[in-house]
Image (cartoon, rainbow, N blue to C red):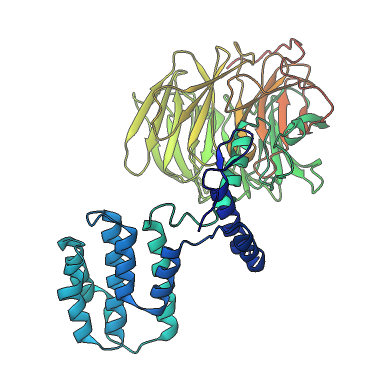
Amino acid sequence: MENGLSEVLGSKGLLKKHEFIRVLVQCLYSLGFKKSASCLEHESKILYKTADYEFLEMQVLSGDWDSCVAVLDRIFDNSKDDMRNTALYLVFKQCLFEYLKRGDVSLALNVLRKQAPMSKMGKEKVHRLACDIVCSKEMKFGEEDSCLVQDSRKNLLVELKKLIPLPIVFPERRLEHLVETAVMDQIDKCLYHNSCDAVSLYKDHHCGRDQIPSETVQILMAHKNEVWFVQFSNSGKYLATASSDCTAIIWKVLDDNKVELKHTLQSHKNPVSFVSWSPDDTKLLTCGNGEVLKLWDVDTGVLRHTFGNNDTGFTVSSCAWFPDSTRLVCGSSDPENGIVMWDTNGNELKAWRGTRIPKVVDLAVTPDGESMITVFSDREIRILNLETKVERVISEEQPITSLSVSGDGKFFIVNLSCQGIHLWDLAGEWKKPLKLSGHKQSKYVIRSCFGGLDSSFVASGSEDSQVYIWNLKNAKPLEVLSGHSMTVNCVSWNPKNPRMLASASDDQTIRIWGPGKLNKPENRLGDQANGRNRRTG
C-alpha cells in the first residue's frame, strides 16, 4: 500500500515522494542491498513491487498459467489492448513450450483450440501460436530440462515487464538512468569535456581548460624551412611532418608524451606538403604539389617505392590509404593524371581520368574504405561510394584549400579561403553545413582536423600565427593558442590521446600542445600577431 501519494519533494515540488522512495527501493535491490531495501519498504510502507505484479511473478515462476492469464486480464482492463494481447501470446507460448517438452500433446492442443481463443487475444496471435508449434525448434518434443524451463520463465518475466503499464512496473535501474541522464545533460553543456572517465556525483560537472591541449609542452626544431604538414599516426605512437626543406620527418611519441626524432626522410627534390599514414602504421606516404609520391618503411626509414617520376610530370598533391594498408589512392593537381589507385608494389589498380576529373585539390578515403571524398578545382566536393558507384556532389561558394574526415567516418570538414570551416555529414542528410569561424585564412593552404573525445572538437591553423580550437556545439572558438611566430599551416590531434595536439608553422617549428593550466584565463581572442607566408594554395 502506497502512502503519501500527494507529497512532493525538491525545491521545485516536481518529485512525487512515493515514486522517489519506490525508485530508491528498486535501486537498493538492484545493488544487492536486500535487507536495506526491505527495511525501507517496511518503514515507508511503500513497496517496490505492486501486489498484482508480485502475484504474476509468483505464478509465472511456478508455471500456473491459468492464474497468469487471470492477473493479466486484471492488469489490462481493455481486451483490445495490443500490449495485453502480446503479453497473453507470450504466456500461452511458454505454456505450449512446456507442455510439448514433457509430451503433453492433449494439453497443448487444448490451449491452442480453447484457452487461447477464449482469451480474446485475436485471431492473428492464435495463428502465430499454431505456426510456432509447426516451425519453432524450441517447440519440438524432447526431455524436459528443469533448468532450461526456469530460465525461459525468467526470460518471460523480463518480456512481460516491458509490456505491463506504469505504475504497476517501471524500467529496471530507474535511478541509475535518471542520474546518468542528469550527468549526461551536464556533460553535454560542458564545452571542455574531453574524457571518458566517470564523473563525480558530489558536485555539478564542469571541466576546465586542463582537459584540452592548450599549453605548449615541447617545440620541435629539426626542419630547416617552413613546416607545411603534420599528422599523428593512427596508433598515436608516431608523428610525421613535411617541410618546404624537401624532407619529411618521422617522430616517435614516448610514454611521457615527449616527442623524439626517429627518421629524416630525404629523397624528394621539391618541397613536401603532404603525408599519409597506413592504417597499420607500418608505412608512410609523402608527396607535394611539385613532387612525386613516395612510400617509406616506418620502422627503418627506408624508401620502399616511388610512384611515377618528376620527369614525366606525374606529381601528386594528396593521397590516402584503404583500410587494408595494401592499397592507396592519390590525386594530382594535373588534370591529365587524375586519380590513381595503386598497390604498395606500384601496380596501378584503377584510375579516374578524363574531362570529368579536373584538378584534385585534396582527397580522403573513409575509415571503412567505402567512400572516397575528393575536392576538385577549388569549389567542388565529390563523394563517391566505391561499391555502388553512386556519387554525390557538394558545391561551395568559396575556394576550398583542404579536407579532413572524422575518426568515425561520419563527418568531414573543409577549410575555405574566406576564413571559414564547413562541417558536412557524409550521409548527406544535412542541407547546409555547420559553420565554424574566427581564424584567419585568405591566401594560403590552412589545414584543420577533428580531435578529442568522440571527435567533438575541431582544431585549425591560421594565418595570424595562432591555433584555433572549437567545440562543435559552438561556432565560435573555444580556445586560441599563441606561441608560433608565423602562419600555422596544419594541426593534428593525437587520435589516442585527446589531450595532445601538434601544430606546424612557417616559423620552421612544430609545437606539441598539452593540457592547459586551470588557473590561467581562457584565451578566446588570442594575441593578434601577424605572420607572413610565402606559400599560396
Looking at the rendered structure, the number of numbered marks drawn on it comes to 0
Toward the right, the furthest residue is: 519
- Would residue 511 be found to the left or right of residue 434 on screen? right
- Name the residue located 75 percent from the left edge and 10 percent from the top edge: 528
Question: Could you say where residue 314 lies in the image, as x and y percent from the top left?
Answer: 50, 30
Q: In this view, does 39 lie above or below 300?
A: below
Q: In this view, does 69 lie above or below 394?
A: below
Q: Is residue 312 above or below residue 166?
A: above
Q: Nearer the viewer, residue 325 or 1?
A: 1
- Can residue 122 be seen from the camera position used here? yes
- Corner quadrant of residue 77: bottom left
Q: Nearer the viewer, residue 164 or 194?
A: 164
- Corner quadrant of residue 132: bottom left
Q: Nearer the viewer, residue 32 or 462?
A: 32
Question: Could you say where residue 511 lies in the image, as x and y percent from the top left?
Answer: 77, 29
- Name the residue located 34 percent from the left edge and 66 percent from the top edge: 71
- Would residue 476 be found to the left or right of residue 82 on screen? right
Q: Nearer the viewer, residue 94 or 535?
A: 94
- Corner quadrant of residue 14: top right
Q: In which quarter of the image is the C terminus?
A: top right
Question: Could you say where residue 49 lies in the image, as x and y percent from the top left?
Answer: 49, 62
- Can residue 314 be seen from the camera position used here? no
- Would residue 59 be found to the left or right of residue 193 on screen? left
- Name the residue located 72 percent from the left edge and 23 percent from the top edge: 505
Q: In this view, does 160 lie above or below 393?
A: below
- Would residue 148 be found to the left or right of residue 531 on screen? left
Question: Could you say where residue 497 lies in the image, as x and y percent from the top left?
Answer: 70, 43
